[in-house]
Amino acid sequence: MTNLNWLQSLQAIARTGSFTRAAEQLGLTQAAVSQHIRQLEDQYGCVVLRSLRPLALTPTGQLLLSYADEITVANECLQQRLQANDSLQGDVGLVTPGSSGLLLYADLLALQLSQPGLIIRHRFAPGAEVQQAVLDNSYHLGVLTFKPDDPRLYAEEIAEEPLELVYPAGYQVREWQDLQRLGFINHPDGKAMATRLLSRHFPGNPGVTTLPCKGYSNQVSLLLQPVALGLGFTVVPRYARQAFAAQDKIAVLQCGQPVIDTLWAIYRAEWPLNARCRLVLERIRSTLNQAAASQIQ
């Protein structure tokens, strides 16, 4: 059997494209990672193309990487089976978009308080990172705004989330010129979301890029603060707006043809969820559905 430490170094190089970053990720010295690769190459021939940046694997390296990934999945399956799957104690890794994550965070803390021994690791990340985190087995559960087509993932529909145009309370938004006077508060997905929603509110509009940009934030928890202060408007998912504390400082433009995204819970398809993961998933579903039913405006 090939040494697992050697294979882990190969996996890290495939992920990072660098001996240095692979060593940092594994908590090893670069010399140790290099030694592992040399030992693989002594046994199987060249596995890493060192002339390329980032580093690339040879066909032999790719075969060894596939073998290493199969071992990783098998080990994770073994751990799942060895754990007391009927226990609600232990770790649950959850990765979500910021909007739904904001709404879920407090309720999941309450769940932890009610279940001593339950530990929820909750990370906010964009969709591509959510999917990869679950594929890498670093998180058990993820929430996406799209249904993945990777056969290694199981996806189930858990909620719907409309996009909302949010502007300062007390302002009037009836025409495109009103948005021009306000200006746009942008965020990483802001222009894409605004383009989708504004086409419903203002058909034939000249586009969000023609609006003056009055601010930017990559933190969804902070995004509505400049709106509340009257600095501009933005377009965000409803759950991000519902999580904002100062609801009296903002307003939502009603849309007869809303843009609605489906939220999907994802997890690895190779094995069933254990009891504590199922508990967290049901709490997520309940929290999101209650928020959708309330439709706080």
Image (cartoon, helix red, strand yellow):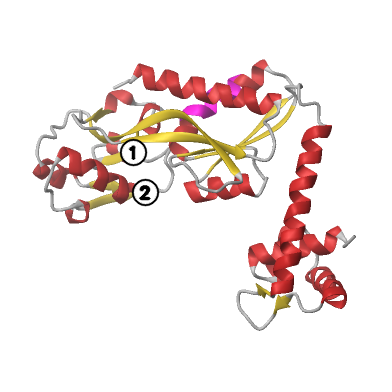
Which label is found at residue 189?
A: 2
Q: Secondary structure at mark 1?
A: strand
Query: Looking at the figure, which quarter contains the N terminus?
Result: bottom right
Q: Is residue 109 magenta?
A: yes
Residue 182 image position (x, y, % from top left): 18, 43
Mark 2 nearby-residue class (10 Å; few <14, some 14–19, many ≥20): few
Q: Image quarter for residue 14?
A: bottom right
Q: Are marks 1 and 2 in contact (CB under 8 Å)?
A: no
- Residue 186: in sight, yes or no? no
Looking at the picture, tell me which residue is in the foreground, 239 or 10. Answer: 10
> Going by the image, does 65 lie left or right of 17?
right
Please state the extent of the stretch shown in magenta in the rendering.
103-110
Name the residue: 61% across, 20% down.
111
Name the residue: 80% across, 62% down.
7
Q: Tell me the residue that label 1 is attached to.
A: 236
Q: Could you tell me the amino acid type at mark 2? A: Asp
Looking at the picture, tell me which residue is in the foreground, 48 or 197. Answer: 48
Query: Looking at the figure, which quarter contains the C terminus?
Result: top left
Q: Is residue 200 above or below residue 48?
A: above
